[in-house]
Image (cartoon, coloured by chain):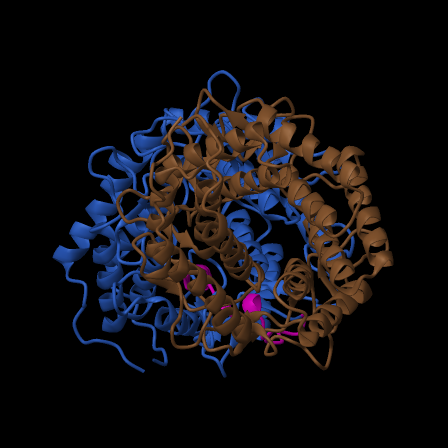
Chain colours: A blue, B brown
Amino acid sequence: MSTSPAPALSPARLLTLRDSYRDGLLQSTLPFWFPRAIDAEQGGFLFSRDRDGSLLDTDKAIWLQGRAVWLLATLYSEVEPRPEWLAWARHGLDFLRRYGFDDDGRMFFLVARDGRPLRKRRYIFSECFMIVALAAWARAAQDAAALDEAVALYQQVLHALRTPGVLPPKWDVETRPMQGLAVPMILTVTAQVLRSSGADAALCRGWIDESIAAIRRDFMHPELAAVLEVVGPQGEFLDHFDGRTLNPGHSIEAAWFILNEARARGDDPALLQTGLTILDWMWEFGWDKQYGGITYFVDVLGKPVQEYWHDMKFWWPQNEAIIATLMAYQLTGDAKYAQMHTQIHDWTYARFPDAEHGEWYGYLHRDGRLSSTIKGNTYKGAFHIPRMELVCWQLCDELLQHGPRRIPHAG
Amino acid sequence: MSTSPAPALSPARLLTLRDSYRDGLLQSTLPFWFPRAIDAEQGGFLFSRDRDGSLLDTDKAIWLQGRAVWLLATLYSEVEPRPEWLAWARHGLDFLRRYGFDDDGRMFFLVARDGRPLRKRRYIFSECFMIVALAAWARAAQDAAALDEAVALYQQVLHALRTPGVLPPKWDVETRPMQGLAVPMILTVTAQVLRSSGADAALCRGWIDESIAAIRRDFMHPELAAVLEVVGPQGEFLDHFDGRTLNPGHSIEAAWFILNEARARGDDPALLQTGLTILDWMWEFGWDKQYGGITYFVDVLGKPVQEYWHDMKFWWPQNEAIIATLMAYQLTGDAKYAQMHTQIHDWTYARFPDAEHGEWYGYLHRDGRLSSTIKGNTYKGAFHIPRMELVCWQLCDELLQHGPRRIPHAG
């Protein structure tokens, strides 16, 4: 057990941090995307943008449409009830309801500007982003029917995952049955959003328990001190490229989902320990000791990774690490996490934000040099950065008011 | 029209080049892969290797199995009839015949070490590499039945491409019908291999004519001075990420397939001009004026590319550019192509070969620094480097004996 005697993040530092998250959200990130991204002619949002905001592509990624609705509705509920935020959320939700679904009830991955389908993938992620969009909307607009819709869609996702044949598999399930960390992760955070939007708390808690149990049982491997991304059905280590490839930013995101669950359950110490363990393990793999920042992919056995962009620094792993370290500090008061937060925050803020046009770059080389000026594409839109800014603004406020909670923990 | 008065590649330089291609093939590339890659226990080849040859993954990519059979059988026919080359080709072909095909006659993309299926993709590339494997084997072993098999499989590929519904599309074909350059390219080179293996020359010529006509009509866009990778069904420019993304190494590969067809048809001047035009256009897009080498992806309108590894230097685009520039010089005697060949050859040979363990690295950063020590994976095996070494060895021999052909050309 280790807690620092004095707060490692001073009130002055916390004030500076709080202002930078709040101002970044309200004066840089949101004004970059809105109202610019709103497609007044054909509905939804146009997120594929170059650094100056100019449009690069008119196709609409369903993930990003759902995430933006979640963001706008959540800001309305948690920051202030600006009518335009609610109207824009409604605008996005209308597009998703109208064009997001295929005839079989599953959702598309990419549609054209006018909503006609372009790609449908084999997973349940589009559906999960639709669920958080519906749930956040339901909370903001006090729309009980939308919350029912969201809960029903969550149950449909569970059915699809548990019923062989509903989702076409990418790999042969007989030769090499596999499961991915992304599934229990998204089921966790999606159920958390449902709960905070007013869905049945016991039902959501059960879903979250199941997903966190799967992460602990199958994906956390103490003998490797790692959280694996892809394992066998009983958590077996798969000694192949995919089975060895760690995604530290992704599992650090899982860490703060679990830390947040500890907070939601009155500082549950077992959940706290799980979240801290994941953060500690994956920081060790992910933090680039030579150049700084969280590396995209690392082989758990130190072998070369097959993915070409393995050593690049993307925006979102840094976002997840900034949240996770600050949340770990807020729960424990441990100076170690304050130090890690300062390290990743300062490294990231010195490189990613675009002072001229607002928002952040998304893609840096290992050493921090810019790889691409793209601000938005099929995967990057109004989500990871504003979510980090909102969560960290709230964490700083809590720390400024109450200090860290100083829950005992192993470390 | 421009031809240089004196040969721009001196006999001394050609001798050095010839020796480096020949010795690279016989003393570095082949000894790295064989017999190491041969899986004596379970058949086929194990190509996923780190720089020192240690095994990284036991999965077997069908593309690479077929390409290796083509290589070994072609070396037997064109270099010398070493019995082990024929035996190893047979070893690979046995594995492909036994485990390569699904029940519907289409081929898998990836199988496990024991041959059980892992992934099947939506394309016809596995089949085309099987065809060249069968054809080269037929030629080497004088196995007429294998040649019939190869021709029948080519006809099956054409049927699959022309019959809606046989290949499951990745994109919605109603919203955005598309065609890719890779298809007429692989149909061209596959028919060339069939012809050189003894298949009906008129039949093969017809297939090649159709494919090159499609490249000229739909993919070459003079108004952009570019060969596009993905276009609409009538060659329409698609102003989206995918439609704008050029792959210069890939279209430079198309250039030398067409230049090679000009050679096969007694120096056909129209084919020569098409090949040179593609090479000139795509060299302009692909050659990195700051750091040298051929860049992976470039946006035809100068916008940012969505693919993360856009500015990396992979081994194979350099291979294709080394072949295309030398072949262009052999056909024209134009000092410009001699200069381009020297430029890309010297840049590549200063960075990619691994003097310690043999063969080449595959993945460099834009500035030439090593990104990964991987020698083989799902996509890199015994193919692009030895093919380049073989073709360029033969071109150097021809140039040493006869000098360039000096066919008149615009340029």
Q: Which residues are magenta?
A: A233-259
Task: Name the residue rendered at 28%, 49% in the picture.
Answer: B291
Task: Name the residue rendered at 63%, 64% in the picture.
Answer: B75
Quadrant in which residue A102 is drawn:
top right
Question: In the image, residue B371 lies at what x, y percent?
Answer: 37, 62
Numbered-mark total: 0
Regarding residue B397, the answer to whether it shows in the image is yes
Question: In the image, residue B341 lies at what x, y percent?
Answer: 38, 47
Can you say whether A283 is above or below A194 in the image? Answer: below
Task: Name the residue rendered at 61%, 75% in the picture.
Answer: B37
Regarding residue B304, the answer to whether it shows in the image is no
Residue A255 lies in the magenta stretch: yes
Q: Is residue A41 left or right of residue A13?
A: right
Can you say whether A76 is above or below A396 in the image? Answer: above
Question: In the image, residue A107 lies at what x, y percent?
Answer: 65, 39
Residue A212 lies in the magenta stretch: no
